[in-house]
Image: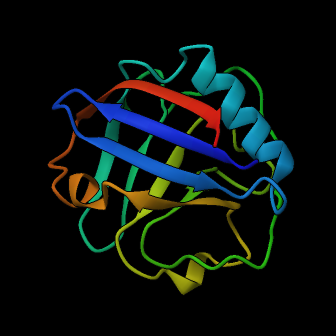
Amino acid sequence: MAKQAKITLENGGVVLIDLFENDAPNTVANFEKLANSGFYNGLVFHRVIPGFVAQGGCPNGTGTGGPGYTINCEINPNKHERGVIAMAHAGKNTGGSQFYITYAPQPHLDGVHTVFGKVTEGMEYVDAFKGRDKMSTVEVTEV
């Protein structure tokens, strides 16, 4: 069994993400806990930079908030290629709830941020983000 995240967008789009539990077990567990508790429901992608990343998961909607705690980085061999999901942070071991999805390879982020999954369906919805796109629900399940 593997874990998969499903982000259902306010516009009806669905983004499916295979999670790398073996490479980033604590990061995946944190994301799963937040997702399945409803933390991400109704939050927006507050930072959308075409060619770079779409970032969401801030409860303030500004990039300044988190869940009230931080988690350690789990740097692994996965690269920042198009469509990966990784933890955003303000410095080593300061991640919490904010994450981003890459639009294109970002090799300068390899070894700096924890890559913990890859989009398998729905990247066209991420590509169409204009900013402030809302997540209706986020859930993690076994597949």
Name the residue located 28 percent from the left edge and 74 percent from the top edge: 51
Q: Using the image as rendered, state which of residue 90 and residue 12 is in the foreground.
A: 12
Apparent side of residue 63 relative to residue 34 in the rendered image (left or right): left
Where's residue 107, x and y in %?
56, 85
Q: Using the image as rendered, state which of residue 29 and residue 132 is in the foreground.
A: 29
Q: How many marks?
A: 0
Q: Does the rendering let one see residue 89? A: yes
Apparent side of residue 13 relative to residue 21 in the rendered image (left or right): left
Q: Does the rendering let one see residue 87? A: no
Name the residue located 67 percent from the left edge and 64 percent from the top edge: 113
Above or below, 129 against 71 in this view is below
Above or below, 135 against 107 in this view is above
Q: Using the image as rendered, state which of residue 85 and residue 67 is in the foreground.
A: 85
Query: Which quadrant of the figure has residue 109?
Result: bottom right
> For the C terminus, which image quadrant?
top right
Q: How is the image coloured?
A: rainbow
Where's residue 59, x and y in %?
47, 21
Name the residue located 81 percent from the left edge and 40 percent from the top edge: 71
Apparent side of residue 129 relative to residue 34 in the rendered image (left or right): left
Where's residue 129, x and y in %?
19, 50
Where's residue 137, x and y in %?
41, 23
Name the residue located 28 percent from the left edge and 54 percent from the top edge: 126
